Amino acid sequence: MKNFFPEVDKVQFEGRQSRNPLAFRYYDPKQVVGDKTMEEHLRFSMAYWHTFTGAGADMFGSGSAIRSWDKITDPMELAKARAYAAFEFMQKMQIPYFCFHDTDIAPEGETLKETLNNIDEIVALFKDLMKETGIKLLWGTSNLFSHPRFMHGAATSPNADVFAYGAARVKHALEITKELGGENYVFWGGREGYETLLNTDMKLELDNLARFLHLAVDYAKEIGFTGQFLIEPKPKEPTKHQYDYDVGTVLGFLNSYGLEKDFKINIEANHATLAGHTFQHELRLARINGILGSVDANQGDELLGWDTDQFPTNLYTTTLAMYEILLNGGLAPGGLNFDAKVRRGSFEPMDLFYAHIAGMDAFAHGLLAAQRLLETQELEQFIQERYKSWESGIGAKIVQGQVGLKELSEYAMANDQITHTSGRQEMLEAILNRYIVEA
Ligand code: XUL
Ligand code: CO
C-alpha cells in the first residue's frame, strides 16, 4: 500500500511534559476516566469532506492545499487514492471513526445510476479498508445541497422532481450506511430553508420536510437499518433562514410532525454560536429533553459571523461540552466528529495532523476537567443550594401541584419581604478556571 504520509508514524500519547508536536499530551486512549476509557468517552471521528475532499478553496480563491494524491487526474483513481490516504491518516492518528457524505467519496456521473455506481465502488473499497484497520463509520449522509439541482432545496424544493431525486439519494445513502455498519445517519438541511418569503410556501415546505424524514424512517425499518437518525441544526448559511434553526426549533418541529421518537440531534459548536447560543446551551437543551445524540466538534471565530469550521482548541468550551456529555451518560452511538477544516494558510499535509492532535487533546483535557468537576460536585452543590426553596414549604407545594393562584396569593401576602442570595457568577467562573488549569 502506498504511504501517503511518510513523514509521520503513529501519533502516540507522551504526556503533558512532551514538547513533541506530533504526540498527544492529554489524549491517552486507554486511560480510564470515571467509568470508561478516554477512547470510549470521546469516540473521535474524522470528517471525510474537510480532510480528504476539501482543498482550502473559499469565495475569494481556489484551493491552496498540497496533497500528494492531487496529481491523479482520473476521478475514480483519485477517489480511491483519497480512500487509502484517509485510512492511513486515521490509523496514524488513532481516530476510531469517520463520517462522510455520498458525494465526498466518489465523482458525480452522467446519470443518477452512474453516480450511485461510482459511490458503490468506493464503498466496497471502504469495506475492505475498514475490515483491515478496525476503523468504523460513525455516520453517513447524503449531500443534498452542493449540486445546482438543489438550488431551491431538496426536501423543501418547490419542484417535486427534486424531492424525488433527493429521496433516491437518501435511499441509497441509507443502504450504504447500513452496508458499512454505520451507527447513525445524519440529516443536515443544507438548502432546506429560504431566501425570501415573497416566493415561498413555508407551510408546504415544512410539511414536505417532515414527509421526507418519515419516508427515511420507514425505509430504514424496511431494510433493517437500526442506526440512530440525527438532525443537525444550523440557523443560516447557505440559506438566509434554515428550517432546522437550532435545538429548540428542531425539538418543536419533531414534536409537531410525530418524529420525536425517531430522531436525536447532532449539535455542531459553530452552528450553535451562529444561532446566538453557546455550544453548552445547545447541548444542555438537547440533553434535558433526552435528544442529545452526537456532536460536530469544531469552533467558530468570535469576530467572524459565519461558519468557519475551525478545529476546537478552546479549553473553556471543550470542558463545558464534556460536562454536558458526561451528564448525558456519554454520546454513544454518537461521537465527537471533527467537522473542522485547517485554515487556508495551513496548506501542508502535516497541518492535518497538527489540527487533529490539537482538537483531540483539547477534548481530552476538557474530559479530565469535567470529570473532576462532577466528582467533587462543587458546581452541583452550589446549584442545589441555590434552588433549595423548591424542596420544602411553598416550593414543594408548587412542584407537587398542590396550590393554585389563590393559595399562592395568600402565601405572598404573608411573605412579601423577599430575601435573595447572590448568584456568585464570578466566584464560579474562577472555580471553573481552577479545574481547567489543574486538569
Ligand atoms: C455544514 C455542516 C455539514 C454537516 C453534514 O455546516 O456542518 O457538513 O455536518 O452535512
Ligand atoms: Co456539521
Image: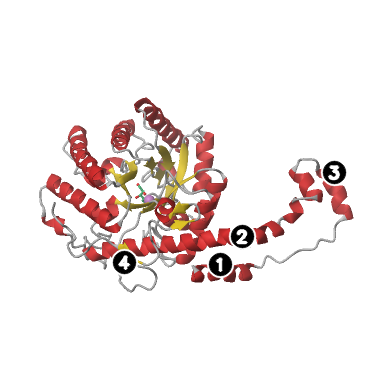
Q: Secondary structure at mark 2?
A: loop
Of the two numbered discs 1 and 4 in the rendering, the one whose residue sits closer to the viewer:
4
CA–CA distance in space, label 2 to label 3: 38 Å
Label 2 CB sits under 8 Å from any ligand 2 atom: no
Q: Residue at x 62, y 70 (%)?
A: 426
Residue 25 position within the rendered picture, expressed as x and y whole percent measured from the top left: 37, 67
Could you tell which of marks 1 and 4 lies nearer the N-terminus? 4
- Confirm or deny contact between disc 1 and disc 3 (CB under 8 A): no
Mark 2 / mark 4, whichever is N-terminal: 4
Q: Earlier in the sequence, mark 1 or mark 3?
A: 3
Which quarter of the picture shows residue 13? bottom left
Identity of the amino acid at label 2? Gln
Observer able to see residue 211: yes
Name the foreground residue: 382 vs 115: 382
The residue nearer to you, when weighing 15 against 22, is 15
Q: What residue does disc 2 label?
A: 377
Is residue 244 among what the camera can see? no
User: Which label was assigned to residue 432?
Assistant: 1
User: What amino acid does circle 4 point to?
Assistant: Ala
Identify which residue is drawn at 74% across, 65% down.
421
Whether ligand 2 has any atom under 8 Å from the Cβ at mark 1 is answered as no
**Residue that numbered label 4 is attached to:** 23
In this rendering, the label closer to the viewer, 1 or 3: 1
Real-space CA distance between mark 4 and mark 3, rounded to the nearest whole angstrom: 66 Å
- As drawn, which residue projects farthest toward the top? 222
